[in-house]
Amino acid sequence: MSDYSYPLKDAEFIINDLIGMENIVDEDRLDEVNGELVSAILEEAARLGTEVIAPLNVVGDREGATLDENGVRETPGFADAYRQYTENGWSALPFDEEYGGQGMPRILGTATEEIWQSSNLGFSLCPLLTHGAIDAIEKHASGELKSAYLPRLISGEWTGTMNLTEPQAGSDLAAINTKALPEGDHYRITGQKIFITWGDHQMTENVIHLVLARLPDAPAGVRGISLFLVPKFLLDENGEPAERNDVHCVSVEHKLGIHGSPTCVMAFGDSGGATGYLVGEPHRGLMAMFTMMNVARQSVGLQGLSVSSRSYQQALAWAKERLQGTKSDGSRFPIIDFPDVRRMLMLMKSGTEAMRGLAYISSAESDASRITSDPGQAAKHTARLELFTPIVKGWLTELSQELTSYGVQIHGGMGYVEETGSAQHYRDARITTIYEGTTGIQANDLVGRKLLANKGEVLADLLREIQETSKALVATGDLSGIGHALQQGVDTGFEASQWILDNARESRDVAGGAGVNFLMLLGYVCGGWVMGLSALKASEKLAAGSGDEAFFKAKLITAKFYSEHFLPRAGACLETIKAGPGSMMEMPLEQF
Ligand SMILES: Cc1cc2nc3c(=O)[nH]c(=O)nc-3n(C[C@H](O)[C@H](O)[C@H](O)COP(=O)(O)OP(=O)(O)OC[C@H]3O[C@@H](n4cnc5c(N)ncnc54)[C@H](O)[C@@H]3O)c2cc1C
């Protein structure tokens, strides 16, 4: 057992009450996939998470993964936990039934993923990347590759990796050098990839690498990159792993956190070339890889929530136990009675609830786009999901830096030493703003592709919807304070996007300088929207006398706190955006 417990009530509230089953499940499946089934699935996942995966979190941190002549040896205990994870069908939950998936809504994949991530961030990265590989293969690979690889990836018998980064090509993928030479029905891949998460391990019989490389006739830049599937073991005529392919992990990084997740340097073709198969069209690999990256970006955003939620639970338990104040009668009281400790706990509680709501609502857009038969509606849901992706990735992970830091702060000195485990959450959270595109890269995507490219229409549509929520809150009377704060947040959103639209043409520095503040502004406002929706629903439930009264009352307080402590930050972001890039770009280099 561990100290972690999944906040099931909050998840049920978001899925059943805020989103609604009818928006994520086909009409004809509503009898089968209903609120009861959702609860049963989440309870079962939480059992595996808390009893099996979470106790290995500290083991992963202390013992990590090692490399020997047989390749990477994962943390002791992980293989058995992974076996239980796959045997119970968790890896197949949200995938297409055609290839052995269970065809459950994506949002259930997201909710269960929160459980694996909160339980053990290092462990959860293995299924995370497999998930992305499945989506990329499903969408872009040939029928033959799909039949050979998808069923075993979906069942979890094999795992997947994502091989983009090279020493000279990090954020800038145009610099990729790995080569692919055609040879009959396949290609010979040579090159080195660095920082490859779960690039090797012994938990499964095969590891399937998705690799970006260049064909001999490739044009320069990102338009000359192709995507290849490179298995660790080549398949024999029966589709079973047989001959060892020429791809090996040559070292494992020592790093700040997520020690349970092996971060590998991968050598392709040291003995002549690794056999690889083209996925999708030649030179269109980056587009195919974006399918994988977008899934992974949502999942990494979710990591920001998951690690903060675990950190919060631990800080809360500590704050209730740690005695520091002394009353006039000489008795001592716990630190949770101090307003400043309350402030930090409420920032953690309201922050994580807003993050969860936004991550789940975003995931539900993917279900909504699948179940509608109206192409216009499907396009709208897809555009909303694309808009949410950099916000979920960027805002949730940036906020997790602050929240996990409060987790340490609430522990005082015991937070700084490793004994309590709070420091691990803080260290583990640090990577989330870096991989899958740094926050700077998310901001570029948000401003470039999601604002300037469509003149802000998709964003304006979202802001108008948030405005409706603020009006509904104001109209209740009781919740009008939350409504006014949200309205101000929406106004800053409109003003900031208009300012960027008006000024971006002046120079590239305008959008580049404003991006991260714009992303954070929208994150705070979207979080305020989720909390506003939650307050409306909670108050409706309280008036109807239905459900858990204490939970709904707490939700109202949490929403109010969020509106008072997080929403005003949107105004500060706006002021910074409007100051423009002058003071950051004017400084002569030699004066830094
Ligand atoms: C633990 C770990 C696991 C990883 N897992 C994988 C994996 O599985 N597969 C994989 O392919 N890669 C993986 N990566 C690599 C990761 O995705 C990159 O580290 C990340 O994309 C940043 O690239 P970089 O390290 O080269 O930094 P750089 O690109 O050098 O960035 C350095 C700084 O410059 C900024 N910057 C760079 N370009 C721009 C720009 N255009 N606009 C604004 N700011 C910019 C960045 O925001 C950052 O602050 C992993 C990395 C780590 C540390």
Image (tube, rainbow, N blue to C red):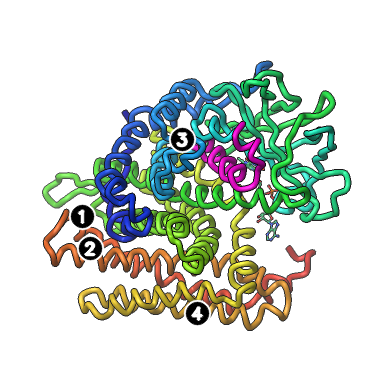
The amino acid type, in three-letter code, at marker 2 is: Ala
Residue identifier under label 1: 551
Q: CA distance from mark 1 to mark 4?
A: 33 Å
Which residue is denoted by mark 2 in the rendering? 538
Q: Is residue 127 magenta?
A: yes
> 440 or 391, which is in the foreground?
391
Label 4 lies in ligand 1 vicinity (Cβ under 8 Å): no
Which of these two is toward me, 330 or 114?
114
Mark 3 crowd level (few <14, some 14–19, many ≥20, 10 Å Cα): many
Q: Is residue 167 above or below residue 459?
A: above
Alpha-carbon span between mark 2 and mark 1 = 8 Å
What residue range appears in magenta?
A: 122-148
Is disc 3 placed on a helix, strand or loop? Answer: helix
Tag shown at residue 494: 4
Q: Would you call the spot at circle 2 few (<14 residues within 10 Å), some (14-19), or many (20 or more)?
A: many
Decide if ligand 1 comes within 8 Å of the CB at mark 2. no
Q: Earlier in the sequence, mark 2 or mark 1?
A: 2
The residue drawn where x is 45% and y is 21% is 80
- Quickly name the residue at label 3: 91
